[in-house]
Image (spheres, rainbow, N blue to C red):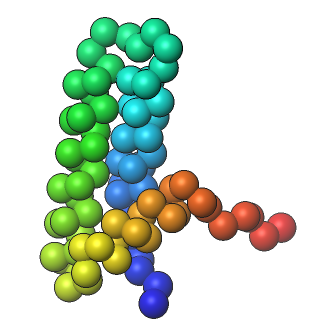
């Protein structure tokens, strides 16, 4: 089953990953943990909203988002 994912959802997941990297760096910048928490909450809300809007399992949407961002398919040239 292929789940259509809006680019905004993938961007939110990438922003959460970037915020996590900043927060867990050896010398994280001021406010990095708050930024990570807020980014993670934003992506979770967006996943829940997208699942409800498309009548798709929330877990399936979250897994598809994580796979698309963390393990993207290579470009076919």
Q: Is residue 73 above or below residue 37?
A: below
Residue at the outermost bottom position: 1
Point out residue 30 in the picture as x, y percentages from the top left corner.
Answer: 31, 9
Q: Residue at x 25, y 81 (%)?
A: 57
Residue 40: name its quadrant.
top left
Quadrant (top left, top right, bottom left, bottom right) of the N terminus: bottom left
- Taking the view exactly as shown, the residue that stands out farthest to the right is 77
Residue 37 position by quadrant: top left
Q: Residue at x 40, y 69 (%)?
A: 63
**How many numbered badges does the structure rendering display?**
0
Q: Residue at x 43, y 70 (%)?
A: 64
Q: Is residue 29 above or below residue 18?
A: above
**Residue 47, x across and y down, in percent:** 26, 63
Quadrant (top left, top right, bottom left, bottom right) of the C terminus: bottom right
In the image, residue 75 lies at what x, y percent? 74, 64
Task: Place residue 39 in its image quadrant.
Answer: top left
């Amino acid at each position: 089953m292929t789940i259509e994912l809006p680019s905004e959802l993938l961007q939110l997941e990438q922003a959460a990953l970037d915020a996590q990297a900043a927060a867990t760096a050896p010398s994280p910048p001021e406010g990095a943990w708050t930024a990570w928490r807020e980014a993670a909450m934003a992506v979770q809300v967006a996943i829940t909203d997208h699942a409800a809007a498309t009548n798709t399992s929330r877990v399936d949407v979250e897994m598809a988002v994580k796979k698309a961002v963390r393990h993207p398919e290579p470009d076919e040239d």
